[in-house]
Image: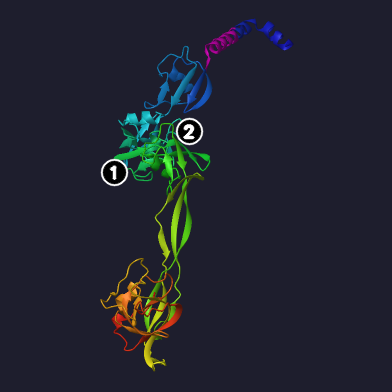
């Protein structure tokens, strides 16, 4: 410092000139510092703080080391004064590949928004179009300072009939389901859609879509919430996985429209069966048997009782009995007649009598009584004429009418009485096989006893034989 003073004192003129130069430089530096300003310049999305003395936006960008080309983008414009400008955005143009309907176009642009880039090449976007930015859907791609590749898929128009209301939707999706999603329709599993969601959009110009409605099903003691679509209660229940089975019914009825509140009650119906059986008696049937002697019987078939069945259907609704229906009875087991074989075999035998031997072909125990013309059992009445027109005398006998019609004119032998001709009819004694022995009033003998009546030969034709005696 001491030496500087000594030099100034020794060279006053040189010292004055040098000081003037220094002061001028310092002044210039002060003016330059006062003219500088801080500007934020965003270059291709990257912000940078730049100190510049430029008067225009373009000069400031040049001070940041960026040489602008005519196709580059600057905001504000490059020629605009820098006065009052604090932020500048600069995007340098870059090549972009655009693919539309299989055709590729390449352009150079500084535009960053895909919509604006497509507009530059005269492409207008419509509802349903899809734009892919660098391989990602436009909606899913991250904000970018500018893509390098764009792909446009044009949407297809689809006529949608939604529960009777028609509208057009557009989508570039590959399937019908994607098209509905693009239009804001969120499908449920219970929705009804034709064609199905996975069908290709190609040719799918008419689509029927019926969205499911909330369904509340009261069934089996619980409330089942669900979604279902259908024109009727039955369709909605089937689509909801609660079908009507057998005799089940719904409230409202199966064919009714789905109620506005979506509430349906399912009544489970079952049927029980009660079976009642009644035993049916069998009949006895007589059949001739040539191997059995007359007036003898033999059991051929014991028979079997039948069974008459009746069925009652019992109806239950949700476990409670609600009604009974008696069905017509039917024969569950047919009764089988008991079969008795009666003898038709004739055996000729001989009987010794006081008047000599006789031949007989039948012997029947019978209760014997006697009668005469004035002992007919009718008070104050006498008659000598018998049923066959002959006169009543000893040697004639009467049978029951049913026996007389078959045995009229046959001869029998009664021990103690002798031979008699079946000539007359009488009332008989209930419950007994009966014969009434004839007399005249003068030789009358009273009979009240069991005897054996022998039917004498010759044997009458088969039509005049009562094979089974009552």
Of circles 2 and 1, the one toward us is: 1
Using the image as rendered, state which of residue 107 and residue 156 is in the foreground. 156
Q: Residue at x 40, y 25 (%)?
A: 73
Residue at mark 1: 203
Residue 377 in view of the camera: yes
Q: Within 10 angstroms of label 2, few (less than 14), some, or many (20 or more) residues?
A: few
* Numbered range of the magenta stretch: 20-38
| Up-down relation of residue 96 to residue 89 (above or below) | below
Compared to 7, does 137 lie above or below?
below
Q: Main secondary structure of the magenta part?
A: helix
Q: Nearer the viewer, residue 50 or 188?
A: 188
Label 2 belongs to which residue?
142
**Relative image position of residue 150 (x, y in whole percent):** 38, 36
Give x and y (percent) for residue 247. 42, 48
Q: Are the residues flagged by discs 2 and 1 in contact, CB closer than 8 Å?
A: no
In the rendered image, the residue lying farthest to the right is 2
């Amino acid at each position: 410092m001491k030496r500087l003073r000594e030099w100034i004192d020794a060279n006053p003129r040189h010292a004055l000139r040098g000081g003037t130069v220094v002061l001028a430089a310092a002044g210039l530096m002060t003016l330059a510092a006062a003219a500088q300003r801080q500007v934020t310049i965003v270059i291709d999305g990257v912000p940078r703080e730049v100190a510049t003395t430029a008067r225009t936006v373009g000069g400031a960008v040049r001070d940041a080391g960026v040489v602008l080309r005519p196709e580059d983008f600057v905001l504000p414009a490059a020629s605009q004064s820098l006065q009052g400008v604090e932020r500048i955005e600069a995007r340098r143009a870059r090549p972009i590949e655009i693919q539309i309907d299989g055709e590729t176009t390449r352009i150079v642009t500084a535009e960053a928004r895909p919509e604006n880039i497509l507009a530059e090449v005269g492409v207008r976007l419509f509802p349903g179009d899809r734009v892919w930015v660098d391989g990602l859907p436009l909606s899913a791609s991250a904000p970018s300072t500018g893509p390098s590749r764009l792909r446009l898929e044009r949407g297809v128009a689809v006529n949608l009939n939604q529960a009777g209301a028609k509208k057009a939707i557009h989508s570039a999706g590959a399937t019908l389901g994607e098209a509905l999603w693009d239009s804001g329709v969120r499908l449920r599993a219970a929705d009804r859609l034709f064609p199905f969601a996975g069908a290709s959009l190609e040719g799918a110009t008419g689509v029927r879509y019926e969205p499911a409605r909330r369904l509340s099903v009261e069934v089996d003691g619980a409330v089942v919430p669900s979604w279902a679509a259908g024109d009727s209660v039955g369709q909605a229940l089937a689509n909801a996985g609660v079908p009507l089975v057998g005799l089940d019914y719904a409230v409202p009825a199966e064919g009714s429209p789905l109620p506005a509140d979506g509430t349906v009650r399912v009544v489970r119906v079952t049927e029980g069966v009660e079976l009642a059986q009644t035993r049916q008696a069998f009949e006895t049937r007589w059949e001739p048997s040539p191997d059995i002697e007359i007036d003898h019987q033999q059991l051929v078939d014991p028979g079997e009782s039948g069974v008459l069945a009746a069925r009652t259907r019992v109806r239950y609704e949700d476990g409670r009995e609600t009604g009974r229906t008696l069905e017509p009875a039917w024969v569950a087991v047919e009764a089988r007649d008991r079969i008795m074989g009666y003898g038709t075999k004739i055996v000729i035998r001989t009987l010794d009598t006081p008047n000599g031997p006789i031949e007989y072909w039948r012997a029947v125990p019978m209760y014997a009584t006697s009668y005469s013309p004035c002992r007919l059992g009718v008070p104050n009445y006498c008659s000598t004429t018998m049923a066959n027109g002959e006169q009543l005398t000893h040697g004639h006998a009467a049978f029951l009418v049913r026996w007389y019609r078959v045995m009229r004119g046959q001869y029998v032998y009664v021990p103690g009485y002798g031979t008699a001709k079946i000539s007359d009819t009488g009332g008989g004694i209930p419950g007994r096989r009966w014969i009434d022995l004839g007399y005249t009033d003068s030789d009358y003998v009273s009979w009240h006893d069991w005897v054996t009546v022998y039917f004498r030969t010759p044997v009458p034709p088969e039509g005049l034989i009562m094979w089974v005696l009552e």
